[in-house]
Image (cartoon, grey):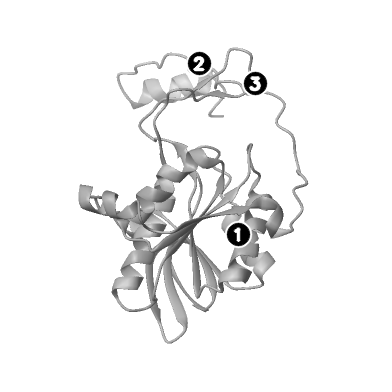
């Protein structure tokens, strides 16, 4: 089972609305969150290796997210579920929804991108593991599954860390895990006939209580122009003058 989120394409520059009420998304290209696309590729490779029988995609949102689910189906996923819900969603609500779907589908492994490029929360996978009561391995740069155990290599400050977690488990994917495959036109056409189920949010019977409220959006402040220095002594003197060095 792979969680998929629809985000503004990472090549597109996003601007804040003049009134600060949100992001101006009208007319922008939307895509699968890049980290989720890596998670889909990881699931497909596990299927091709005979580790699992099928790959299920799950996403939360209105009908507008279905093209991204169809893209995932075109990559090779077998079926998809769209949990029908409107508005922005917090990580905890998404994790609760994914947990409810996981209880229904009983997957051997749940894969998510380590974060979404629109809000950068990076919490959903960890919350899902806690709700599900299953092991987790985050920021995977390598992943193998054998004999009911997922072995994950992840990058940490000191180097590389290898974890072995019993299945079912939750794994979040990093950029270095793989390169997602290119989707060809025949696969896009085939994806139109693959099952895409719409599940009402109310059917999950989970609370939708929000934990926080976003009051205003604002662009980051303009960066001041840099200063050129000709050598190290001048650099040190400049840093001292600005109070950076004692």
How packed is label 1: few (under 14 Cα within 10 Å), some, or many (20 or more)? Answer: many
> To which residue does mark 2 refer?
222
Say whether residue 49 is left or right of residue 138: left
Alpha carbon separation for disc pair 3 and 1:
28 Å
Is tag 2's residue or tag 3's residue first in the polypeptide sequence? 3
Q: Quadrant of residue 16?
A: top right
- Image quadrant in which the C terminus is located: top right
> To which residue does mark 3 refer?
21
Tell me the residue at 55%/38% (across/down). Answer: 119
Tell me the residue at 66%/44% (across/down). Answer: 90
Say whether residue 65 is left or right of residue 204: left
Give residue 117's position: percent from left, percent from top: 48, 40
Tell me the residue at 25%/54% (across/down). Answer: 187
Q: Quadrant of residue 42?
A: bottom left
Viewer-proximal residue, 226 or 195? 195
Disc 1 is placed on an element classified as: helix
Is tag 3's residue or tag 1's residue first in the polypeptide sequence? 3
Is tag 1's residue or tag 2's residue first in the polypeptide sequence? 1
Disc 3 is placed on an element classified as: loop
């Amino acid at each position: 089972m792979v969680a998929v989120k629809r985000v503004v394409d990472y090549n597109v520059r996003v601007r804040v609305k003049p009134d600060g009420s949100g992001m101006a998304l009208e007319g922008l290209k939307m895509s699968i969150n890049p980290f989720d696309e890596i998670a889909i590729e990881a699931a497909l490779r596990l299927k091709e290796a005979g580790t699992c029988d099928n790959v299920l995609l799950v996403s939360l949102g209105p009908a507008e997210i279905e093209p991204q689910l169809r893209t995932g189906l075109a990559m090779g996923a077998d079926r998809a579920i769209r949990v029908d819900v409107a508005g922005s969603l917090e990580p905890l609500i998404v994790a609760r929804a994914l947990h409810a779907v996981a209880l229904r589908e009983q997957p051997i492994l749940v894969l998510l991108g380590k974060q979404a490029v629109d809000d950068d929360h990076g919490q959903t996978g960890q919350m899902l593991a806690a709700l599900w009561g299953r092991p987790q391995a985050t920021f995977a740069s390598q992943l193998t599954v054998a004999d009911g155990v997922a072995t994950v290599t992840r990058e940490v400050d000191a180097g590389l860390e290898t974890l072995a977690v019993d299945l079912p488990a939750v794994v979040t994917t990093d950029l270095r895990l793989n390169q997602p495959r290119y989707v060809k036109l025949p696969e896009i056409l085939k994806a139109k006939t693959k099952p895409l189920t719409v599940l009402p949010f109310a059917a999950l019977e989970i609370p939708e209580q929000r934990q926080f409220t976003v009051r205003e959006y604002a662009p980051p402040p303009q960066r001041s122009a840099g200063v050129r220095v000709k050598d190290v002594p001048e650099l040190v003197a400049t840093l001292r003058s600005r109070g950076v060095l004692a």
